[in-house]
């Protein structure tokens, strides 16, 4: 029985030591998770071949204003200074601005990496290809030979015609 007790005490000591080692690692990963997720998003979802020229043409200014606004709102939601390594205290707005700026710099770095290795996100077509032709044997035999895949003609709505003439001022004595 004493062997079992010694083994259980040894196992509990190992689990305690493992937990004491894993907890700080988990806290570090938790603190870095926004940066990890944002870097994955920047690498896999943003097409930097299109975004880079857009930013160079002037979209950087609204981006900077948005970053400052995010830091300002964050500083009002969580108003506290940041104690940096116990050596220096960073003021309320400034550490939020630095964190948001670090995210923006990380995104730009991911764009540089994407262009360096010629990576591109997968293009997902949101609209059907207008030049795609499909065969006549697509399972719509009941339409007959005159079926040409054209939409039905739109009937003219008399109310729409009346409101259009009203907008032009026809019924108020205006010119038509």
Image (cartoon, helix red, strand yellow):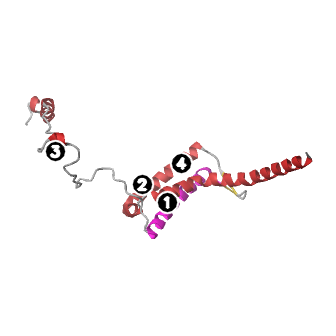
Answer yes or no: is residue 97 visible. no
Contact (CB < 8 A) between labels 4 and 2?
A: no
- Would you say the magenta stretch is mainly helix, strand or loop? helix
Label 4 to label 2: alpha-carbon separation: 15 Å
Label 1 to label 4: alpha-carbon separation: 20 Å
Q: Residues within 10 Å of mark 1 (few under 14, many from 20)?
A: many
Label 1 to label 2: alpha-carbon separation: 16 Å
Quarter of the image with the N terminus is top right
Which residue does the numbered mark 4 point to in the structure image?
Answer: 72
Contact (CB < 8 A) between labels 3 and 2?
A: no
Q: Closer to the N terminus: mark 4 or mark 3?
A: 4
Q: Closer to the N terminus: mark 3 or mark 2?
A: 2
Decide: is 115 above or below 95: below
Q: Nearer the viewer, mark 3 or mark 1?
A: 3
Label 3 to label 1: alpha-carbon separation: 46 Å
Q: Residues within 10 Å of mark 4 (few under 14, many from 20)?
A: some
Q: Secondary structure at mark 2?
A: helix
Q: Secondary structure at mark 1?
A: helix
Residue closest to the eye, 155 or 16:
16
Residue interval drawn in magenta: 90-117
Which residue does the numbered mark 2 point to in the structure image?
Answer: 62
At 14% from the left edge and 44% from the top edge, which residue is drawn? 147
């Amino acid at each position: 029985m004493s062997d079992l007790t010694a083994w259980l005490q040894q196992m509990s000591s190992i689990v305690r030591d493992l937990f004491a080692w894993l907890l700080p690692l988990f806290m570090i990963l938790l603190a870095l998770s926004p940066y990890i997720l944002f870097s994955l998003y920047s690498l896999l979802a943003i097409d930097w071949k299109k975004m880079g020229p857009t930013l160079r043409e002037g979209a950087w200014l609204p981006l900077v204003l948005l970053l400052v606004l995010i830091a300002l709102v964050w500083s009002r939601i969580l108003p506290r200074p940041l104690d940096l390594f116990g050596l220096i205290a960073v003021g309320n707005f400034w550490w939020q601005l630095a964190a948001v700026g670090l995210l923006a710099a990380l995104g730009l770095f991911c764009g540089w990496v994407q262009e360096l290795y010629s990576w591109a996100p997968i293009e997902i077509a949101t609209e059907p290809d207008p030049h795609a032709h499909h065969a006549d044997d697509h399972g719509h035999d009941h339409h007959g030979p005159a079926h040409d895949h054209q939409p039905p003609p739109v009937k003219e709505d008399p109310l729409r015609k009346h409101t259009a003439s009203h907008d032009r001022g026809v019924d108020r004595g205006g010119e038509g």
